Amino acid sequence: MIYSTLTAELSTTVHALALHTYTIKEWEALQDTIFASPPCRGAGSIA
């Protein structure tokens, strides 16, 4: 369902997709958590 929804983006502007799936209990425990974005090749540049 996710990939079919993002088909256009995945074929043009989005080059990677990471899915982090949680149970409701896990999600509630993470509400005050800020995740760092991993470094990307070419980060900060527009191709």
Image: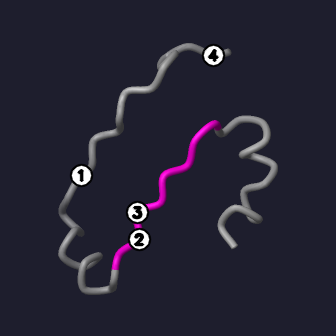
- Density class for disc 2 (Cα within 10 Å; few <14, some 14-19, many ≥20) is few
Q: Are marks 3 and 2 in contact (CB under 8 Å)?
A: yes
Residue for point 41% across, 70% down: 21
The mark that comes first in sequence, 1 or 2, is 2
Q: Amino acid at mark 3?
A: His
Measured in 3D between alpha carbons, the distance from the residue under mark 3 to the one under mark 1, in whole angstroms, is 13 Å
Position of the N terminus, as image quadrant, is bottom right
Identify the element where label 4 is drawn. Answer: loop
Measured in 3D between alpha carbons, the distance from the residue under mark 2 to the one under mark 4, in whole angstroms, is 29 Å
What residue sits right under mark 2 in the picture?
21
Q: Which disc number belongs to residue 34?
A: 1
The mark that comes first in sequence, 2 or 4, is 2
x then y, percent, for residue 14: 65, 39
- Density class for disc 1 (Cα within 10 Å; few <14, some 14-19, many ≥20) is few
Q: Are marks 1 and 2 in contact (CB under 8 Å)?
A: no
Q: Amino acid at mark 2?
A: Thr
Range covered by the magenta-colored residues: 15-22
Residue for point 35% across, 39% down: 37
